[in-house]
Amino acid sequence: MKIRLGYLQSDLHHLPAFVAIEKGYFQQEGLAVEVIGAFRAGPELMSAFSAQALDVGYVGLAPAITAKANSTAHIKCIALVNTEGSAIVAGKESSGKSVADLKGKVVTIPGHATMQDFLLRRALKQQGIAVNEIKLLVLKPPEMIPALSRKDIDAFIAWEPYPSKAVTENAGRILMTSHQIWAQHPCCVIVADEEFCGKHPEMVQKLKSVHRRAVEFINANRPEAIAIGVNYTGMDGKTVAAALGNITYGGVPERQYVAEYVDFLRELRYIRPDIAKDFLMSILPEQ
């Protein structure tokens, strides 16, 4: 059977998927994989799971947990793709020196309930700034750098390679990386349809093996990994190289970090607060 795979468009966090495709790791493990699509956002990818159009996907932890909470997709996390890899970026000519200087400014996030939404709120709280003291807007990451250059916005937070692209284009400067906001925080995961996991446990194990090989390749062959990243994101080599310095691939999801994020989603009612945390945590792979 063919495994139907999806990932997010131009998202460098999903470099292990790009490497696995380019290096033929899926075929070498005896897996027939068909890329169904490069989705523009996590909720779109999770909708494909809801429509039973995907078996496996690379996606942010946030839309995965939200889909689990709303029972719109019956999925299981089989691996952590990466930790960290986001940043708050201010305009190149802005006078602000830190997150504290965002008070009263226009700041954009990729979407509500995203990891970037959480990271920004966490950074503001660390500086004693309430969210209502900034003007918070939602904007797709590809639109953020042009908006920053036009001075339509004062700052943004996004996943890589967009923060690094703002720097290499001389449009912005990084105020704070997600490592500085929340060290080793989980970001993207590989999720699989629960029925697929139940029927094909051997394939799930092979997918995990493919992911481990891809991560090892990225860490051991940085120049070629950068070239693959350039090919799949459309960004230049300098940008991709800089962005990779802010991303850590592989590892396992730290349950206490995921629990903290679940509390955030419940507190802001992005998911119903009455849903049991144990149910939401069941998305994680067995440790």
Image (tube, rainbow, N blue to C red):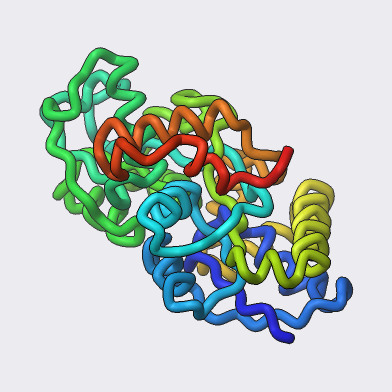
Seen from the viewer's position, the closer of residues 161 and 20 is 20
Res 12 quadrant in image: bottom right
Residue at the (39%, 63%) spot, across then down? 72
Please provide percent x and percent y for residue 96: 25, 25
Res 23 quadrant in image: bottom right
Seen from the viewer's position, the closer of residues 95 and 134 is 134
Residue at the (24%, 45%) spot, across then down? 108
- Res 234 seen here: yes
Residue at the (47%, 54%) spot, across then down? 64
Would you say 133 lies left or right of 54 here? left
Residue at the (61%, 79%) spot, across then down? 4
Res 34 quadrant in image: bottom right
Residue found at the far top of this picture:
128
Query: Eyeballing the image, is 266 above or below 198?
Result: above
Seen from the viewer's position, the closer of residues 52 and 85 is 52
Please provide percent x and percent y for residue 157: 35, 41
